[in-house]
Image (cartoon, rainbow, N blue to C red):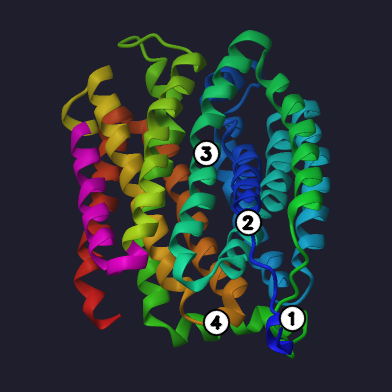
């Protein structure tokens, strides 16, 4: 046996990647529990403030992306991941205990900040994966993420409908502890490439990466539109379903998460397409499919229209996400955490802005106004694909 063979790292088994997929699903779910429960929260806690919980949570997530995720290029990643997972239950307990709208918003901001640990795990999976399987591995982990996003609404809808909305956050706290234990047990130690930078230098380098890579800018702007319309729909769904036309509660809003989970099937497919033939055509197709979904929402105003539209929307967003991440993770491997920071921070800022805009438009113009917002953002996302050759 040669010295080179003896020193080569052991290949990472699929069990580790599936554990990472479970961890990102359980963690990202904390951002979305509130969405199907907004109607209940609004009735219990007076004031408009509580309807902005999804927006504030996403703002906290975006802040964590900028302030915490770049540390993955500087410090040992496993320790960072476990520590953030251990801190998350305390933030969830604060939401469960918060008595007023403003205190719920403050605690939700902290939940979002700590839940950004998801974006420590995803680039670590890309780093651990063999280059010829990177798209597939990212697809596996992102399938877990999408399951967490969508099924969190299903779980929250049923828990809130039976035990009240605060019970969901009490349930989420021990789940976060389980995630911390799983990551401590399963993750290998993985030191980043020496960057020769301080924490301040890492933050300052984000702008340089943004300027250097046109492909990063296009991927970020594209996914801003995709995640923006995704956030518009899921922020307003519970409020839409409780209107007299439907008269449905949080359980029904949660069931839509099960339908949307069909998009999970698109993740491995997108990863394989990115590995074999390149992600560009997949992204263009996904942008067009997103527009189709919002035309369905606007002009087919029934439960059947919502079902068809959400299936198309969630598949489109997942196809686009996996394909765009395949693009950006290949740009500069030693800066993968920072590149992911730029990409995801832009995406979640767009999600927060879109959620806030959707809430304001809902109160003024109802579902028609929300549909026009979704169509407008989708058109911008599709138009951006005309820049793809230059990227």
Q: Which mark is residue 344?
A: none
Regarding residue 302, the answer to whether it shows in the image is no
Which callout, 3 or 2, points at the residue further toward the start of the chain? 2
- Location of residue 315 by image quarter: top left
Write down the residue under mark 3. 149
In the picture provided, is 27 more to the left or to the right than 145? right
What is the CA distance from the residue labelled 3 to the residue labelled 1?
Answer: 42 Å
Residue 207 — which label?
4
Quarter containing the N terminus: bottom right
User: Which label sits in the foreground, 4 or 1?
Assistant: 1
Front residue of 113 and 130 = 130
Horizontal side of 252 relative to 298 (left or right) equals right
Question: Which numbered disc flags the more N-terminal residue, 2 or 4?
Answer: 2
Which element type, helix, strand or loop, lies under badge 4?
helix
Is label 2 or label 4 in front? 2
Q: Give the spatial CA distance, label 1 vs label 2.
A: 18 Å
Give the number of the mark in front: 3 or 4.
3
Part of the protein shown in magenta: 274-296
Q: Is 295 covered by the magenta stretch?
A: yes
The residue lying at 77 percent from left, 84 percent from top is: 198
């Amino acid at each position: 046996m040669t010295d080179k063979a003896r020193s080569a790292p052991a290949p990472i088994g699929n069990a580790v990647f599936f554990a990472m997929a479970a961890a990102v699903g359980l963690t990202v779910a904390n951002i979305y529990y509130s969405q199907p429960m907004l109607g209940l929260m609004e009735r219990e806690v007076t004031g408009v403030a509580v309807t902005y919980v999804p927006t504030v949570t996403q703002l906290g997530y975006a802040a964590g992306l900028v302030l915490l995720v770049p540390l993955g290029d500087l410090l040992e990643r496993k320790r960072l991941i476990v520590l953030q997972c251990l801190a998350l239950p305390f933030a969830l307990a604060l939401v469960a205990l918060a008595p007023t709208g403003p205190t719920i918003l403050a605690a939700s901001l902290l939940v979002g900040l700590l839940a950004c640990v998801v974006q420590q795990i995803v680039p670590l999976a890309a780093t651990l994966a063999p280059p010829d399987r990177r798209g597939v591995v990212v697809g596996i982990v992102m399938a877990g993420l999408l399951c967490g996003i969508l099924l969190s609404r299903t779980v929250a809808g049923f828990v809130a409908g039976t035990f009240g909305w605060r019970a969901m956050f009490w349930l989420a706290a021990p789940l976060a502890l389980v995630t911390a234990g799983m990551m401590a047990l399963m993750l290998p130690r993985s030191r980043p490439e020496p960057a020769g930078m301080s924490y301040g230098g890492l933050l300052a380098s984000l702008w340089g990466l943004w300027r250097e890579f046109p492909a990063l800018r296009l991927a970020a702007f594209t996914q801003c539109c995709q995640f923006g319309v995704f956030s518009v729909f899921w922020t307003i769904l519970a409020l839409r379903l409780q209107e007299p036309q439907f008269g449905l509660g949080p359980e029904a809003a949660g069931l839509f998460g099960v339908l949307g989970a069909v998009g999970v099937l698109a993740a491995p497919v997108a990863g394989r397409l990115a590995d074999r033939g390149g992600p560009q055509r997949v992204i263009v197709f996904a942008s067009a499919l997103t527009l189709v979904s919002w035309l369905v929402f606007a002009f087919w105003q029934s439960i059947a229209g919502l079902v068809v539209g959400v299936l198309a929307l969630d598949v489109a967003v997942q196809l686009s996400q996996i394909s765009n991440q395949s693009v950006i993770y290949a740009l500069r491997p030693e800066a993968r955490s920072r590149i992911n920071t730029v990409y995801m921070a832009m995406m979640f800022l767009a999600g927060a802005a879109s959620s806030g805009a959707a809430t304001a438009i809902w109160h003024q113009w109802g579902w028609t106004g929300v549909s026009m917002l979704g169509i407008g953002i989708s058109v911008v996302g599709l138009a951006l694909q005309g820049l793809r050759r230059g990227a």
